[in-house]
Image (cartoon, helix red, strand yellow):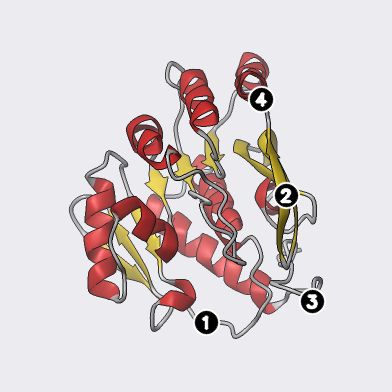
Amino acid sequence: MKKIMTISGSDCSGGAGIQADIKAVSSRGDFISSVIVAVVAENTKGVKSLNYVDSNLVKDQIDVIFEDMGTDAIKLGMLPSEEIIEAVYESLKDKDIKNVVFDPCMVTKSEDELVEDKSIEILKNKIFPMVDLICPNIPEAESICSMKIKNEDDMRKASKLIYNMGVKNVLVKGGSHIDGSIDVFYDGENFEVFSIKRIDSKNIQGTGDVLAAIIASNLANGMDMKKSILNAKEYVTNAIETAPGIGEGFGILNFFHEK
C-alpha cells in the first residue's frame, strides 16, 4: 500500500476535488491523506460559493502529515490564491518529495473560475519546478501560455512552452475542445499523442482530478510515466462509461468500476 497526498479544494457534492481523489485512490487500494485549501459549495451544475482555508492552516496540514507518515506521491489540485501557493511551496520546498502530479484546476466543467488571475505567475515560479507532471486542459493551458489552442500543433507548442517553465513532463488534455479528444505528452525531448475512445456522456465531473490522482498512485507504485498516464486514461474512460447517472449537470463518475 502506497501513501498518496492530495492538496486541493473540497467538493461538497463528492464528484470532484478532494472527495474524488480519495475515492479514486482508495479504489486502487492505496492510502490517501488530504490537505484542504478551500471549501467549495458546488454540485454537478456549478459552483455557488467558496471560501479559502487560512494559509497557515494549509501549511500545518502538510507539515503534520510529513511529521507522521510522509507520502510516496503528491497530487496537487486547486491552488487558488498567492497566499495558499506560498504556503504549499514553503511546506514542500525542503521536503523529500517525488511523483508530484499537478492538475491546475483553474476552471470547472461549468466554466467557473477557481484560481485568481494574479496567482498564475507565482504558480509558475514556485510550484512548477516541483512538478513531475502537469496536466492542464485546453482552457488552463491557454491561460498558462497566453495563447489560443485550436489543434494538435497548438497543443505541441503549448506543451513546449509549459515545459520550459520548469516542469519535468507535460500532458495537455484535448478533451472536447480538440477533434479526436487527444492528449499531447511532452518530456522535453519527445512528443507522444494519447488517444482513447471518446464516450458521449455528460457524466464527466472531476475527470481531471481523478486522472491526476490515479497517475500519482501509479507512479508511487513504480509504473513509468507513459504507462501511468495511459492506465489512468483507461480508468477515467471506464468510470465515465459506467457512471451511475447521479446529478443533473456534469454527472458523477463510477469510482469503483474496477471492483
Mark nearer the N terminus (2 vs 1): 2
Q: In which quadrant is the C terminus drawn?
A: bottom right
Q: Which residue is mark 1?
A: 198
Q: Secondary structure at mark 4?
A: loop
Residue toward you, 74 or 202 = 202
Mark nearer the N terminus (4 vs 1): 4
Front tag of 3 and 2 = 2
Q: Secondary structure at mark 1?
A: loop
Q: Which residue is mark 4?
A: 54
Per the model, the C-alpha gap separating discs 3 and 1 is: 18 Å
Q: Secondary structure at mark 2?
A: strand
Which amino acid type is shown beneath numbered disc 4?
Asp
Question: Which corner quadrant of the image does residue 142 belong to?
Answer: bottom left
Left or right: where does residue 9 sit relative to residue 190?
Answer: right
Per the model, the C-alpha gap separating discs 2 and 1 is: 31 Å
Q: Is residue 131 visible?
A: yes
Q: Which residue is mark 2?
A: 49
Per the model, the C-alpha gap separating discs 3 and 4 is: 35 Å
Q: Is residue 4 above or below residue 189?
A: above
Question: Which corner quadrant of the image does residue 58 belong to?
Answer: top right
Q: Which mark, by number, is residue 154?
A: none
